[in-house]
Image (cartoon, rainbow, N blue to C red):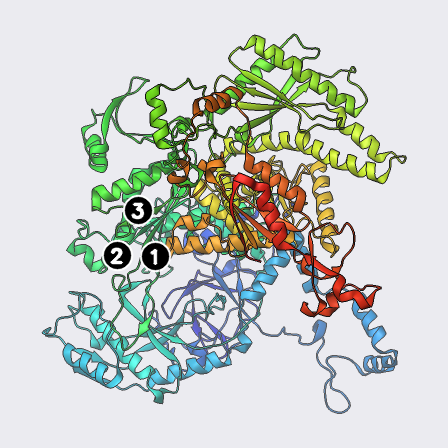
Amino acid sequence: MTNRSRKRKFNSTVFIEENEENSVGNPRPKKRVTFSPTLTTTATYLLESEEESDESDDYDWHTSWVNNLRKSLGFDEEYNEDDDPDYVDSDGGEDLEEDGSDLDPIHDIETLTNTALNSGVRVEEIPGGLTEVKENEKDENEGINGMDDVETEDGGTNGGLTKEDKRIKDGNEHEGMVNKSLSSIHKPPTNEEIQGLRETTDLFKSNIFKLQIDELLSEISIDFTKTSKLENTLNKLKQIFENMNDKLDLTVENAKSILFKKHDIVIPFPDPQPPDDIQYKFGFKRPTTFYLVGSYPLRSVIRGRYGFNVDVVVVMPQSIFQEKDYMNNRYFYKRAYYLAVLAAVLQDKSSGLDTEVKFDTLDGDRRRPIIRLKFTDGPNGDKKLSNEYSSYQLIKGTMDFLANHDFIKSPLFMNESEISEEGEFSKKLFTENFDVVFVDNSGTLNLFSEMSRTALEHLQFEARLAMKFFNESVEDRFEALFLKKVDDMKLRYDNVAKLAQLPETYSEYTNSVKLDYPDKFVYFARTIPHLLKRGLTDRVDLIAINYDKLPSWSTSESPRTYTSTKTKLYFGFVFNPEQSNRSVDYGPSPEDEKAAKEFQKLWGKKAEVRRFKDGRILECVVWEYKRIETRSLIVNKIVLYLLSLHFGIKDGKEGIRYFAGQLNKFVIPSPAVPKHIFDLDIVVKGFQPVMTAYYELTKQLLSLEDIPLRISSVKATSPELRYASVFVPQPHQQQKKPSRLRQYFLSRQNVQMSLQYIEPIEIQIQFESSTRWPNDLVAVQKMKLAFYINISEQLKAKLPDIKVSIVTNDHDVIISPKSYLDIFTASGFAFRCRIYYEREISMLKRVIEDKVSSPKKKEVFKNALEVDKRLFIDLPLHSSQIQTLCNKYPSLSLTIRLAKRWFMVHLLEAHVDEEFIEVLCAFVYLEPQPWSRPATGFVGFLRVLNIISTWDWKNEPMIVDLGENHRGDALSYNDETSSIIEEVREKFRRIRDNPMDERATLFITTTSGQIWGMEKPCKVVAQRILDLANAATACADNVMDKEIAEFKSLFITPMNDYDVLIFLDPTNCPRYYQNVSVEKRSLLKQMISKDWSKNRSHAEKNKWIGFDPVEWYMDELRGLYSNVALFFHDKYGGNIIGVVWKPVFFTPRPWKVNLGFSSMMVSSKNTKEKDEIPSDDNKDNQDSNLVILNSRAVALEMERLGQDLVTKIDIRK
């Protein structure tokens, strides 16, 4: 049998398959038909065998999928029916001409919808991403298991049961629902269920992933049995077009006038508008044909956020066109007029459509307006899965193809064998005229005609990201792949720029370009990324262009343009973190004159010739930065420079606004701060000076010999040594006594020199193992003190320039966290050293587990154990992990610093641990889904706010793999880590299952078992954190989109919710220079006293490390009043303390001795609900014995304790 091509023709009830040699045939049941999504009425399709091949264990489904895709795209030979053993030759039906001219797609509604609505055709997914259509007909042997329905005595049917079967069935009915239930439980699985189980095992990543996909499909699929309203509307639409009358030819002036006056319709002519004196006229004749196209007739449509679309094509008759209509936009003008006449008919009340009629654009192209009809329908359901491949495999294969195929070097032609090398629709013409080529089966339509290379790069970037999530071995990324919203620009890109208006001149926008791109906005958006890509090279992985689609408009309004709607153009940049911060761009050698001229043309005066250390002489561009925070702004500088050089676009609201470095100023003290307090020039090197000082001190400590035990290790535990302190550590140099001129200058500036805060940088010392340590905890603390003294003497003798002091408790204690050795190095950094003895923890546990120990003693030792573990176990491990991550992901440091600043400015100092914030920030980098990993602190910080406000804290613990234990080829965590994770999850479940347990409101744990957020924040404070994060996110949107706020609003906390505000004197706050809103007047306010020189000398001599009277005051307030109030303060220079009373202390209760708080008498008549009043035996004196918190008295006590530190107090409640 010869090789023959197939064509399809749509009938009102079934598919009729026709053959060129035999035009008469019958429907062939259960044969899959694959066809290409062309816009023609005739399509070539391929028949496929239904035989399923057995797959071995090492079957490469991906290779098979790609082969099937290539086959479906036309890369194989034409189908030969002789090779199909299941082929049944068909006959019947009418002959079909090659051009399909005898088809009448408006014959009836079934043909109108390509038989998809009423014919019973079922559409399924198949390999290759195309569509398979399967007839939903009965098997030749109808009934259950091949048994026909059998006629019953009353003339009916019993569904295929014999009389004997029916008798047995009726005889068992008395056993009731129990037996029925049991039979349903124990009945064998159906073939469909068995197939489903096999698919789950063989075709899906996991059971959960399959369930998630099934649930997703059920949410987005359409139930085509519930589309009667839509069918009626389509039927009416068909009738309207069939009954339309031809119109007289009109001049452009008459056409506009009649449509506007009679129908209130403005013809959506594209720019430039047609002149009134044009010679040709506009005619209208009834549409030739009417098609349903797109995904709806193929039944592959899904419901989106705003419903779904049904695409309709109306074909204009050839008779209304003239030979030269391709010139001067004549075709587009006639098209717009034709569309306006259609709109006039559709919005006429007599049409009976009762829908909203608006104009819109196709793909944002003003030359191609469309009509949008809006109505409501609610279909749902209908799951469609392929028999050969699971939906999981299909989507993964599709993403892999999109991610890796080179569309530029290898353009796609679905029927490549039919594409000529020369001619009207040749490969050459397609590749020369389109950025991206994907030609359909007809060989005439480029499906990617509107896609720019920038859009292709964006699509492939997202596909590669999706494949990364698909290939993760430990976690299922279903939510990141299918559920999370990813189009939030401030979270999606590392940097975002917003262009307010286009440049006035654009040399590339020539008259010939205008023919294809009549709107300059669209052409600029399409071409500007090429210039930026040339300048940024490999600094970025993606340059994305975003702008809002032109909204639809009323038919009575003039067509909208991007200029009239003031559409903003957004640039999104995803950085390559390994290259984005380099300071030099290398160009060609000056000897290559052509390349050198191109380089100089690109960079202008910025280009220069330099000799490099390796001897090369090259054209280059050098980008300078002053501080570590500004190094990440090099891409910012390049973009602004190129746009200014080539288009005259300036930085600002009227030009371009680049969002990148606006947050950096919040981790740098104000320029108003005097240099002797904080020198901005010193911190240019970032954390390098303090790390160098730490390594130098570590080297000196390890080299000490004249001590009883050698020091085996020195570990960092301070944020400054893991790149996580809000401010870059400032060295404090020894200062000489100022000259008389300097003294006079300082006195004129009113500088209080003694108030300079010195941050202690904490480290941990551990000695080599020895049995000479005592077995008593108190004695161990004494031994530590002896070692502090010994080390102090050794360091003084070895390094005379350093200053050493020992701080210790005055009484015997079992642990001594407040005992330490302070070392002030010659480099200007102060290190606080603590000794770690590994047996301390086991000694504490022994007392806790001892049955003889009293409950009170056990409680004391439990608290001591928690402190000891945190200081000597958790913090060193945490510091090491965060330091490693900051080195690996450089922008993580700035993210942590910004997040800490945000928490502190909202007065949450005592309510969250610094480590809690650091782990939270690390989670954003280790689990960046659904986006790529942040490469700037700007987007990193905004994502932290997002994760705070969106995470399901109530039901899901946040587990952070700081050690990156499951990265690489590991299929799962190791047994130890898995056990820790399961233990942590169980602990979380126990807490959540206990309604009385209000701990761990924000629960964060690491895979090493460290839990942060167990005891704090409390429930009230946690809710405030969530509210603040939500408000900050909304504020960021306002800044970047609407420009109605400033980023500083994120770092200003509302004070309305506090019951008491305590105002501090800034001149007595050593850290006031760190305040986010520091005032220079406050810094220079206090006059230096007459004995200034004496006081200053005393302060310089003693160097009070860590001295902060505000911190001491806060400790005293919490120690005295934490039972009745919550205190809020910003330790980074905050000069306001917020106080919130605990509501329970305003519930009247009987007075008694040792009540625990300052009280005042209150009558029960003044309470709102008497049920809240506790019972009392003496009912007669109940009113007079009830008391509540005397909040005013307590607030005044707080003011008295502050003495000169407190300037005033505002009692609000």
Question: What residue sits right under mark 2 in the picture?
Answer: 521
The residue at the point 45 percent across, 21 percent down is 733
**Which residue is nearer to you in this view: 987 or 1067?**
1067
Label 2 neighbour load within 10 Å: few <14, some 14-19, many 20+: some
Q: Locate residue 490, reporting x and y percent.
A: 42, 50
Q: Earlier in the sequence, mark 1 or mark 3?
A: 3
Mark pair 2, 1: CA separation = 10 Å
Q: Report whether 876 appears left or right of 14.
A: right
| Residue bearing mark 1 | 547
Decide: marks 2, 1 in contact (CB < 8 A)? yes
- Badge 1: few (under 14), some or many (20 or more) residues near its Cα, within 10 Å? some
Look at 74% across and 34% down and name the residue there: 864
Q: Which residue is the site of mark 3?
A: 529
Q: Nearer the viewer, residue 677 or 768?
A: 677
Q: Is residue 1150 above or below residue 13?
A: above
Mark 2 vs 3, N-terminal side? 2
For residue 122, the mark is none
Identify the amino acid type marked 2.
Answer: Phe
Residue 845 appears left or right of 346 = right
Q: Is residue 132 visible?
A: yes
Three-letter code for the amino acid on which mark 3 is drawn:
Pro
The residues tagged by marks 2 and 3 sit, at their Cα atoms, a distance apart of 13 Å
Viewer-proximal residue, 866 or 435? 866
Q: Is residue 604 above or below residue 835?
A: below
Judge depth for marks 1 and 3 and give the one in front: 1
In which quadrant of the rendered view does residue 451 lie? bottom left
Q: Position of residue 869 (x, y in %)?
A: 70, 32
Circle 3 — which element?
Answer: helix
Q: Give x and y (percent) for residue 694.
A: 53, 21
Report helix, strand or loop for mark 2. helix
Q: How many numbered discs?
A: 3
